[in-house]
Each structure stands twice: as structure tokens, then as C-alpha cells.
Image (tube, coloured by chain):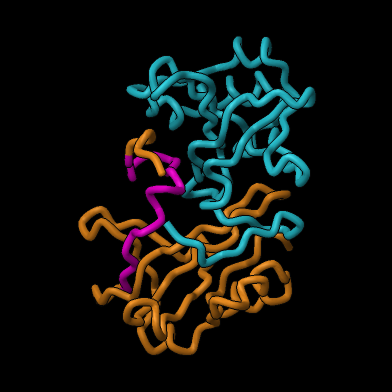
Chain colours: A orange, B cyan
Amino acid sequence: MTDFIARDETATLISADKVEGTAVFNHDGEKLGSVEDVMLDKRQGNVAFAVMSFGGFLGMGEKHHPLPWDTLDYDEDRDGYVVNLSKEKLEDAPTIERNETNRLYDRSYGEKVYGYYGVQPYWI
Amino acid sequence: MTDFIARDETATLISADKVEGTAVFNHDGEKLGSVEDVMLDKRQGNVAFAVMSFGGFLGMGEKHHPLPWDTLDYDEDRDGYVVNLSKEKLEDAPTIERNETNRLYDRSYGEKVYGYYGVQPYWI
């Protein structure tokens, strides 16, 4: 929506606008997808998930993976995020479909997602 | 960028996309501005600021106020956020200009902003 906030990945903060659309790679340099949206926890003020879109063609067959924010490390050289995740591991990872995004609001689903990536949920 | 995540303000989480562009009112029902961007803390995973644009005409004379996330309460009836803030108090509030957004990355500036709104900084 805006270019008001300059991108500066060396800084502590980043604009949510700049996160969205950013590519996600694994450690082997394979592109896994890109960040489609960022989910914020209204009460606790945390970034709950980055929602990554993965594969698909014109939106068909596209998978959406909720990732704990902590799994994403920014790599300046690649101008994208790097996750420690093989394509195979990603294929088994929790996904959400377009018509079931409400599942993200369910803490027990959130715990399953965080558990898959070995990240302690911030709400526990 | 996307409408993948449905808006559901009764839920715990909200998409950053849905926050941006949302109107901000005070308790008297006066429209103060709208959320232009959301700044995320990369390391700590918190929502650091909502950046509200206030007034101005075609971008001229527009002021930008960084607000601690905790100051914003969603009001379903108004379909916008409500802050406990008079227009007068807002006029004295910390603002950032288009060419000085880097100030947001400075923790001492952040403490000044949080202090103005009486909110304990999450990083302290």
C-alpha cells in the first residue's frame, strides 16, 4: 500500500509491507515460495505467523504454509528469507487451504505448527 | 496484496494487510487518521508500532504518528481502531517525517514514543 517506510534489513524493525512478497529459500538456495501475509496477535502484540505460498500456477494448487516468525532469517545476498527446511520436510508441513484460514486462530493448531518447526509458542 | 486471509476481528489474530488502511478514531468518535503501516520487530517478533497518517491533502502536510500497538482497540461498530487520545494530545505527539523513518529503529526514540502514550516498551 505504501512506500513510506524504507527497507532497511540491517535495522531492528521492518515494515509488514516489505515482508509481504519477499521470497523464501532453504539453505540449499532452492526457492520454496514467498511470504503472502503476516498474521499479528492482537492481544499479545506478537507476530504469530508468516504465511508462505508455495508452488501452484495462477493460484491453482497453491499451498499455504503458516511459519513461526522465528523460522525466517533474512539473507541480504538473496534479498529473501532463509528457513532451515528441505523441500521434502516442507511437503509434510502443516498447510492451510483458502477456505480454512480460521484454523490459524485456533491455539491447538498453532501449537501443532510451532511444534513441527521446533519453535516454542510465544503464548505458552 | 492479498485477500487470502479473511478479516475476523473477533479472533485472536489479524492479517497485517487488514490492519493497513483501517481508520483510527478517538473516544469522541472523531476520525484521527488511518493506519498506514505496521512495523515488526525482527528479532523479538513483536509488533513495534502502527504508523498512523493524520490529516494532510494529497500527501502534503501529512503527519505520521508511530503508535504502540497496545494503544489501538478495534471497534466493530466503527470498523476502525479507537485510541484514548484527544486531537490536541495527538497534535503534541511524536511524529516522523517521510525522510526520517530511520528514527523508528532507534530504541531511545521508541522509548520516547511509548512513554508519551504511557505504554511499557516490550523490549525493556
Q: Position of residue B37 (x, y in %)?
A: 48, 39
Q: Position of residue A78 (x, y in %)?
A: 23, 60
Judging depth in this view, the residue of B75 and A124 nearest the camera is B75
Judging depth in this view, the residue of B13 and A59 nearest the camera is A59
Query: Residue placed farthest to the left in the image?
Result: A77
Establish if B108 lies above or below A65. Answer: above
Q: Residue at x 40, y 20 (%)?
A: B97
Establish if A69 lies above or below A46. Answer: below
Q: Position of residue A118 (x, y in %)?
A: 56, 74
Q: Residue at x 49, y 36 (%)?
A: B36
* Region in magenta: A7-26
Judging depth in this view, the residue of B105 and B77 nearest the camera is B77
Q: Residue at x 44, y 69 (%)?
A: A52
Q: Position of residue A28 (x, y in %)?
A: 25, 77
* Magenta-colored stretch includes residue B74: no
Q: Give the quadrant of residue B68.
A: top right
Q: Give the quadrant of residue B34.
A: top right
